Image: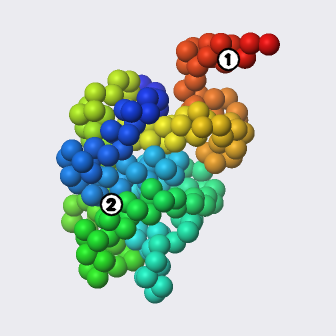
Amino acid sequence: MNTADPIRNPAELARYKNYYLLEDFHPRNYVLVTIGLNSALRISDLLTLRWKDVYDFDRGQFLEHLTLTEQKTGKRSSVFLNKSIRDALRAYMNYMGANRLSGEDFLFPGYENHNLSRIQAWRIIKNAADACCIQGVISPHSLRKTFGYQAWKNGVPPVLLMDIFQHSSFETTQRYLGICQDERDDVFRKNCI
């Protein structure tokens, strides 16, 4: 089994994120990729989301946090719905027709009122990577790893990422960050004492 890679290159990441918005228009797929890249959630948790998990129909507004029990760990998780997520959800809701949606509707519908399957999600994520000529093993888990890698590159302490990922060991978080030799060399290059 191949290990998923994060998307490291910022230009490739920008094109990848917007692929289903600008190149192969599909709002559901765009939101799937956007939430995956911005939430650090596993694909199994993403695919079970319903509109009520992100939107308060009584108040007519998006929630500030997505709160769920992670399927793999059974741990509670609270994810801040940042501007990228809310903007993508708002556009998706408008496209779907807000008045036709119910809180029980899956955020990522598949066939016959079921949620999108893991296989379908894998195809969506892989097709965008292939179309954007992104090298490496790109799979649904790449979205989670990309979140961690980009956060780490932006200065988020690895111990905080360990908490966000709810990893039980720092070694697991290190693997998620996908630190390669070039980045190790860069530390020595910049840290001239």
Badge 2, how many Cα within 10 Å: few under 14, some, many 20+? Answer: many
Q: Quadrant of the N terminus?
A: top left
Camera-nearest residue between 186 and 64: 186
Left or right of residue 51, residue 145 in this image: right
Q: Above or below — where is 77 with respect to 149? A: below
Q: Residue furthest right?
A: 193
Looking at marks 1 and 2 on the same chain, the residue that comes earlier in the sequence is marked by 2
Q: CA distance from mark 1 to mark 2?
A: 44 Å
Which residue is pictured at 45% across the width and 46% down the height?
Answer: 37
Which residue is pictured at 47% across the width and 72% down the height?
Answer: 62
Name the residue carrying label 1: 190
Residue 117 seen in the figure: no
**Residue flagged by tag 2: what amino acid is it?**
Phe
Name the residue carrying label 2: 108
Q: Above or below — where is 103 with respect to 50? A: below
The total number of labels drawn is 2
Residue 172 image-quadrant placement = top right
Report x, y in % for residue 14.
Answer: 38, 40
Report x, y in % for residue 65.
Answer: 56, 66
